Image (cartoon, coloured by chain):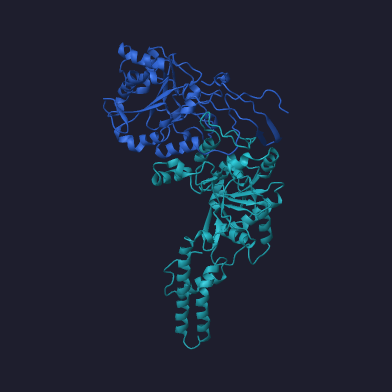
Amino acid sequence: MRWRAGETDSRTDTTFLLFSGCVYGNECDVVASKCEQSSVLLKELRSSMMSEGSSFMKGLILGGIFCLVMSFFETFNSGTHSEGHEHLHHHLKPVSKDELQKLSESQMSDWTLQVRVYCLIMVTPKLLVHWATANDTWSKHCDKSVFYTSESSKALEAIDLQEQDEWARLRKAIKHAYENAGDLRWFFVARPTTYAIIENLKYLVLDKDPSQPFYIGHTEKSGELDYVEYDSGIVLSYEAMRRLIEIFKDEDRCPERGHALWKTPEEKQLATCLKYTGVFAENGEDAQGKGLFNKKSVSSLISDSMGQNPADVVEACCSDMAITFGGMSPSQIQVLMYGVYRLRPYGHDFHDSLTFLPPNDSDND
Amino acid sequence: FYSLHAENVHTTHSIHTAEILNSNILIVKNRRAALDLSQKVRVLCWVMTQPQHLKSRTQHIRATWGKRCNIVLYMSSEASDFPTVGLNVLEGRSQLYWKTIRAFQHIHMHHLDDADWFLKADDDTFVVLENLRYGLSKHNAEEPLYFGRRFTPFVAQGYMSGGAGYVLSKEALRRFVKGFADGLCTHNTEIEDIGLGKCMETMKVQLGDSRDVLGRQTFHPYPPNNYLPRQLPRPRPWYLLYEHYHPVEGPGCCSDLAISFHYIDAVQMHTLEYYTYHLRPFGYKYRFNPGERSENRNNS
């Protein structure tokens, strides 16, 4: 929850609303503890509120100001938390090449079977062109890909969840995917505006056990909550899905439709529900620590790198094993498809220990 | 360019045996050794540039593909510490054929024995040298040959697009320079690719076919997004009007082992570098594997 400085003015209604939101909201642990002091102040004021209405108002305003100021600083400070505070597996990297080479053949074949992915792609009718692009490109590299839509629409081939609310829709999709997973153990949730390289997703989770809870992507922090950014794709293991399905039944901790006066984005609601089940967000990165999940386009990232690292643009920019990019037009995605799966220099062979075959039904990869 | 007899080029093979475990997974036991062509197929690249472009364009070539040439020369109207070679011509579109003539004369005088093939590129062309060497490897640089993106009009036998880059064999370079020395070729146009094409025809240099074994183009006079996106069947767009070979739109336009793209700005230059040399799908078995000995016998 983002508090804006300057919210505390003579509009006592707003202040009171913000204050009450703080007490009832999902992720206000820190703010609540800071507000305790001001709420104590308020209790004392309430008990003597009868005396003068104006001093009650003053108390209320003061308490609200104190609460807001403390939470404002808390939001700023959380960005500079020391490493010791973070969860043990906050940074998740692929298995090293050395480790891969030590594997026996039967282990490799076990892993290649285990690492298959169910893609949940969340569309809406206005994203028809993006649906078509994802359908024609990267989604074919999922072992199973299912498009879920908010409402049916001509030409859009997707499962109609008949649900306008984004969080409720995501819950329905997750339930459907879990029930229809078959023997697939990894799940990837994305909008069709994201482009994903599924082989690199498999590489990241190759040595991770899906019967353990994993929740991976590009992580962001909101107060005390670490969440995976939706725009760059969300990876969930089978166990994480199972725990989610369980906590969905808990209307208090993980409500389907929130009671807050404003809507929390579904990426944060997801993180909160998972947190209650003991599952924490992990940032997917390569051996050098470069993020694998991007919400920006390739050219945007390259352009940034040209400004920041002019001597070493490509090296400093993006991982060789990147998994997602975002914000790319359909024609840019078709070029990216060629760039990922086809364009290469003759003679540069990578001796990867595993092999993934191209899908049966495509001609652009 | 690429022929079905590509195995002749490779001196070592190891046979890879594969076990297919389920419909989607293949594990490869041994892998074919990559052949280093850079000593066998030496390429001298010269980049047509100008002082005003060094910072905005040419430096990005120097930072990306320029270093993959056996020799790279940045040709400009003026010498500089970039380093550029000064050609003693004026700048401007009208001078392009003069620059080309002077550039090849300079190369002939100073570098004839340093390379087997001589590539001309613009300062907004992206080139994949490994794929150029692979395509040239089956050809003899002592024959009068020239490769690039073949255009039809203006010259009877056709000519190669300047922007997409074209490459002359050593013999073709000799004949070009001799043509001007003997007065058989003259500065008869400002348009450098047409002018050079005409001289090649006069000097009986043969146009090569640079398409891959599947008929897909390797040299491209426009960026990839002009060719790759799928299109409904339609009459030829303006940028495909000069094509000698029947153009294909959509994924079949372009070889996996593409050699060049043109009208590439600075951001695109690094983006193509990233796509070609860095970004890749882990473990992916490419569909197109020219030169790989195909498994005719059943492995199981």
State the image quarter where residue A97 is shown: top right
State the image quarter where residue A274 is shown: bottom right
Judging depth in this view, the residue of B168 and A182 nearest the camera is B168
State the image quarter where residue B157 is shown: top left
Judging depth in this view, the residue of A26 and B276 nearest the camera is B276
Q: Residue at x 40, y 38 (%)?
A: B266
Residue A120: give x, y in percent of width and height.
62, 49
Judging depth in this view, the residue of A42 and B161 nearest the camera is A42
The mark tally for this picture is 0
Q: Which chain is cyan?
A: A
Q: Is residue A265 visible?
A: no
- Which quadrant would the C terminus of chain A be assigned to in this image? top right
Q: Is residue A211 left or right of residue A232?
A: right
Residue A309: give x, y in percent of width and height.
40, 45
Q: Residue furthest bottom?
A: A51
Residue B283: give x, y in percent of width and height.
60, 37
Q: Is residue A259 left or right of residue B125?
A: right
Q: Residue at x 36, y 36 (%)?
A: B59
| Colour of chain B in the image | blue
Q: Is residue B6 visible?
A: yes
Residue A356: give x, y in percent of width and height.
63, 37
Whether B53 is drawn above or below A172: the answer is above
Q: Residue at x 48, y 43 (%)?
A: A298
